[in-house]
Each structure stands twice: as C-alpha cells, then as structure tokens.
Image (tube, rainbow, N blue to C red):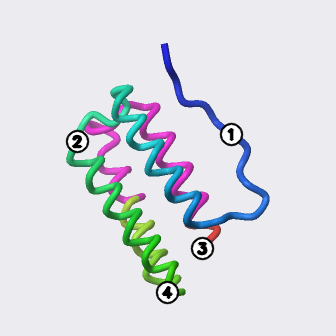
C-alpha cells in the first residue's frame, strides 16, 4: 500500500512551495483515509490559500492567524475527522510553518 512518510525540513523555507506541498499532502491523506471529512480538507485548503495570499503581500500577522486557526481546527478534528496519522501529519507541518512565518 501507499503511505506518507516524514521528510527532512528544507534548510530555508520557500513559503509557496511548502504550503503547496502541505496542500498536496492533505489531498493524499484524504485519499488514504487519514482525513475522513471532505469538508475538513476543503477548509484546510482554504486556510492554506489565505495564509499563502497573506504571505505574498507580506502580511505575516494575517498568515500566522490563518495557520493558528488551522491548528485549532486540527485539534478539534482529531477525535472524529482525522485519523491519528492525519492528525500528526497536519499538526507537525502546521506547527513548523507557524514557527517559520
């Protein structure tokens, strides 16, 4: 079967690439059943787009708020909308992104 595994974080983050990669991971995780709720996936992609759009115009506070909101949604969804693998995948990648913004 297919799985998603950890990779080393980039030495220097390129926000657009990291966010697009995280969005792709979200879609793959949904296919694997790690993101159970399709509505959650849609919200994840919308939140990531909001963060990316804010970064594009150097509104880092808005980007941090968007990522923080996504982290809160991950915590809320961990009981029903996410498998343990999906929860860990999103939580740790979003925490890394938030730390780098």
Report which residue position mark 4 lands on.
57
Other residues around mark 2 within 10 Å, as few (<14) / some (14–19) / many (≥20): few
Report x, y in % for residue 9: 71, 50
Magenta-colored span: 71-97
What residue lies at 46% left-to-right and 31% top-to-bottom? Answer: 85
Q: Is 57 on the left or on the right of 35, as rendered?
A: right
Residue 47 magenta-highlighted: no
- Residue 43 on image: x %, y %: 27, 56
Q: 60 or 75: nearer the eye? A: 60
**Looking at the image, which residue is at 47% across and 47% down?**
90
Relative to residue 37, is residue 100 depicted above or below? below
Residue 80, x across and y down, in percent? 25, 36
State which tag comes first along the sequence, 1 or 4: 1
Residue under numbered circle 1: 7
Instruction: Name the residue tied to disc 2.
Output: 38
Of the two numbered discs 1 and 4 in the rendering, the one whose residue sits closer to the viewer: 4
Nearer-N-terminus badge (3/2): 2
Q: Are marks 2 and 4 in contact (CB under 8 Å)?
A: no
Contact check, label 3 and label 2, Cβ < 8 Å: no
Q: Is residue 53 above or below residue 4?
A: below
User: In the picture provided, is 48 more to the left or to the right than 99?
Assistant: left
| Residue contact at pointers 3 and 4, CB within 8 angstroms | no
Q: CA distance from mark 1 to mark 2?
A: 25 Å
Question: Quick check: 46 above or below 75?
Answer: below
Q: On the image, numbered disc 3 is attached to which residue?
A: 101
- How far is disc 3 from disc 4 in space, using C-alphas? 13 Å
Q: With 42 as the anchor, is 60 left or right in this view?
A: right
Secondary structure at badge 1 equals loop
First in sequence: mark 1 or mark 2?
1
User: SS class of the residue under badge 4?
Assistant: loop
Q: Which image quadrant for residue 4?
A: top right
- Which of the two discs, 2 and 4, labels the residue nearer the N terminus? 2
């Amino acid at each position: 079967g297919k799985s998603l595994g950890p990779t080393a974080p980039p030495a220097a983050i390129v926000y657009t690439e990291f966010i697009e990669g995280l969005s792709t991971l979200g879609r793959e995780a949904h296919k694997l059943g790690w993101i159970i709720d399709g509505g959650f996936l849609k919200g994840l992609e919308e939140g990531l787009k909001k963060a990316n759009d804010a970064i594009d115009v150097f509104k880092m506070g808005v980007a941090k708020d968007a990522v923080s909101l996504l982290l809160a949604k991950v915590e809320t969804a961990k009981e029903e909308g996410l498998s343990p693998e999906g929860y860990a995948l999103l939580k740790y990648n979003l925490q890394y992104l938030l730390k780098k913004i």
